[in-house]
Amino acid sequence: MSPQDELLSLRGISKKFGQVVVATDLALSVRGDEALGIVGPNGAGKSSLFSMISGDLRPDHGSVWFDGKDVTAQSAYRRTRTGIGRTYQVPRPFEHLTVFENVLVSAHQGGGRRGRDAYDHAASVLELTGLAAEANTPAGRLGLLQRKRLELSRSLGTDPTLLLLDEVAGGLTDPEVTELVDVVRRIRAAGLAVVWIEHVVHALVKSVDRMICLAGGRVVADGAPLDVLAHPDVRELYLGGGPESADATADEEKASP
Ligand SMILES: Nc1ncnc2c1ncn2[C@@H]1O[C@H](COP(=O)(O)OP(=O)(O)OP(=O)(O)O)[C@@H](O)[C@H]1O
């Protein structure tokens, strides 16, 4: 990958919490037209990596580059304004505001849009995520899939060019995961780069071009999704332990037409 192709680049990132190592000299690049999946056991440091990309957490060493600029010293707010959007594992919308108002707040605060422009943007985001019919529903009344759609909508409200998805498929039924995968497909078609951390591996396999497996603060495998899932070290990590066996998923995907 040439530097011109890179939208996001992590260079020599290291981070520890006391004795807990979440990243060791980690390097990673994501192209502007790419969808990257991240798998790894619980506690591998996946969400911490997102926090270092979004600016919620500072690395001990190394730098974060976005769109050709070193953003390591930038606040989370500034990074949102420059095009890094993220969802959180536990969505925290404004429960008493409607779906539309929630997205409007993110279009204002995160996206810097005003007036009619913010309204139009919020409306187009809700069309994209399939939540337009619930625009006037208070966020606190949404079911789980709709809350996930709202979490995606709030991050899209900020106008990202890179979207970081943190376990958005968690807790959903299989048919709901299929609907979510469709939304992610539409988001990609709209021209966004996506990095998606997920334990529901089959959702990733259907959605991403490339996958990495993180463990012990390092990239254990990097490549095409099925190759990563078939990697001996990844199989070892997931054997009997992961929420979804990497073996079963790789075999199932190979068998499907
Ligand atoms: N702010 C913090 N202070 C101290 N320790 C932390 C902090 N944030 C995360 N950790 C620890 O760092 C390790 C990595 O956590 P992280 O949430 O990044 O892992 P993860 O791969 O996202 O896990 P999961 O798949 O369970 O969400 C864990 O041991 C966690 O307890």
Image (cartoon, grey):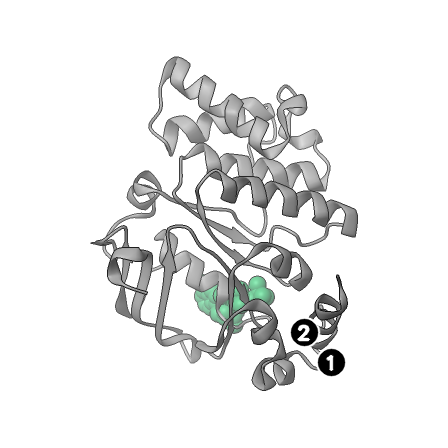
Q: Quadrant of the C terminus?
A: bottom right
Whether residue 204 is visible, yes or no, is: yes
Residue type at mark 2? Ala
As drawn, 159 above or below 1: above
Q: Is residue 216 left or right of residue 2?
A: right
SS under mark 1 = loop
As drawn, 121 above or below 7: above
Image location (x, y in percent) of residue 166: 54, 54
Residue at the spot of label 1: 240
SS under mark 2 = helix
Q: Residue furthest top?
A: 116
Which residue is located at x 65 percent, y 38 percent? Answer: 147
As drawn, 27 above or below 30: below
Residue at the spot of label 2: 246
Which residue is located at x 61 percent, y 74 percent? Answer: 229
Q: Is residue 206 left or right of residue 157?
A: right
User: Given this view, does label 2 or label 1 mark the residue nearer the observer?
Assistant: 2
Residue type at mark 1? Gly
Q: Is residue 198 left or right of residue 193?
A: right
Which residue is located at x 53 percent, y 49 percent? Answer: 88
Image location (x, y in percent) of residue 165: 52, 51
Q: Is mark 2 within 8 Å of ligand 1?
A: no
Whether residue 97 is visible, yes or no, is: no
Which residue is located at x 49 percent, y 61 percent? Answer: 47
As drawn, 156 above or below 120: below
Earlier-in-chain disc, 2 versus 1: 1
